[in-house]
Image: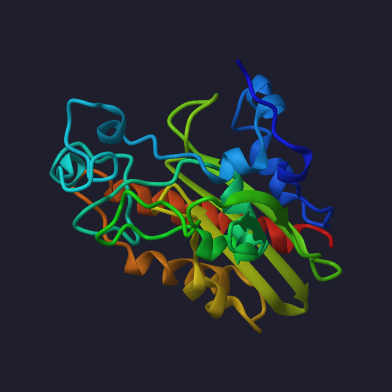
């Protein structure tokens, strides 16, 4: 039996002037998935890590304290940012990456009332409790997603690198927004496929702010965030495509008319 979701609990996205969110979804999932999926479902997807999905293997996220095979095992698709000794799983969804770059808020409702949490703070890093993915409290539901209006003239774009075309998770992805008026007045960039949550590239953003968006400036800014990456045995290759995607997206934003 299928239970319907009460109307007041359907996730919603407010109209905004960004183009990243729909473009983040269009090439990365099947039509059937796009037609049936909800925004809350995208937000609350769990990792595709093979160790999490395989019940015969130890996994601290699935069974706390059981161990984490991926750290010393096959970790080609795992994190390069923000992991701990207990978990190296990535968040699989594409939409939250765009929402993180757009400074979106997740609206929650539960026994304690309502509250709004930035997407960038909605997900936890694994630390010593990798079984807890988000900051949601017991009994809370996602009731909405608020995307603030962009500054007039802002441009945005997203890109995704994956093993094959079709319905598959990102090895690395980027969503970015820029507001240009001769120099970079505002910039936001988030990586997907590299961490336990969408990873805001704060160092890259800071390096871009108030600079002329030349190829050299973008190159230096793009190099700032990956410098802090801590790859695992099998996934050091992720850093270069992530850097290339960020460079390509930022350079395309500079060329695009506002």
Q: Is residue 142 left or right of residue 200?
A: right
x and y percentages locating residue 197 in the rendered image: 45, 54
* Count of marks, rendered view: 0
Q: Foreground residue, 111 or 105?
A: 111
Location of the C terminus by quadrant is bottom right
- Percent of width and height locating residue 126: 32, 57
**What residue occupies the far bottom of the structure in this picture?**
210
- Image quarter hosting the N terminus: top right
Query: Observer-nearest residue: 214 or 166?
Result: 166
Quick check: can you spot residue 250? no
Way the structure is coloured: rainbow
Q: Residue at x 50, y 73 (%)?
A: 202
User: In which quarter of the view is residue 51 placed?
Assistant: top left
| Residue 104 in the figure: left or right of residue 76 | right
Rendered position, 117 above or below 206: above
Residue at the outermost top position: 1
The vertical placement of 225 against 3, above or below, is below
Residue in the picture at 28% in, 62% down: 127
User: Residue 91: in sight, yes or no?
Assistant: yes
Q: Position of residue 56 (x, y in %)?
A: 18, 25
Determine the residue positioned at 45% across, 57% down: 243
Instruction: Provide residue 88's location: percent of width, then percent of height.
Output: 28, 50
Between 3 and 203, the residue placed more toward the observer is 3
- Quadrant of residue 57 in the image? top left
User: Residue at (68%, 22%) from the top-left corner?
Assistant: 31
């Amino acid at each position: 039996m299928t239970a319907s979701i009460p109307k007041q609990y359907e996730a919603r996205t407010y109209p905004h002037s960004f183009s990243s969110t729909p473009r983040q979804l269009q090439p990365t999932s099947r039509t059937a998935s796009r037609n049936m999926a909800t925004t809350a479902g995208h937000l609350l997807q769990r990792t595709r890590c093979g160790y999490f999905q395989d019940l015969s293997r130890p996994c601290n996220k699935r069974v706390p304290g059981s161990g984490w095979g991926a750290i010393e095992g096959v970790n080609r698709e795992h994190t390069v940012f923000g992991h701990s000794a207990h978990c190296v799983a990535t968040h699989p969804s594409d939409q939250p990456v765009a929402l993180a770059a757009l400074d979106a808020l997740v609206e929650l409702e539960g026994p304690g009332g309502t509250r709004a949490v930035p997407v960038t703070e909605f997900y936890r890093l694994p630390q010593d409790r990798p079984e807890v993915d988000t900051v949601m409290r017991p009994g809370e539901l996602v009731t909405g997603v608020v995307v603030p209006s962009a500054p007039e003239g802002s441009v945005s774009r997203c890109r995704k690198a994956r093993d094959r075309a079709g319905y598959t998770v990102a090895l690395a992805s980027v969503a970015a927004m820029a507001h240009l008026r001769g120099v970079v007045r505002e910039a936001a960039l988030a990586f997907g496929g590299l961490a336990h949550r969408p990873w805001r590239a704060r160092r890259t953003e800071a390096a871009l702010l108030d600079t002329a968006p030349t190829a050299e400036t973008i190159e230096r800014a793009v190099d700032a965030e990956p410098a802090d990456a801590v790859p695992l045995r099998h996934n050091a290759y992720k850093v270069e495509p992530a850097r290339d995607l960020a460079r390509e997206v930022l350079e395309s934003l500079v060329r695009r008319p506002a």
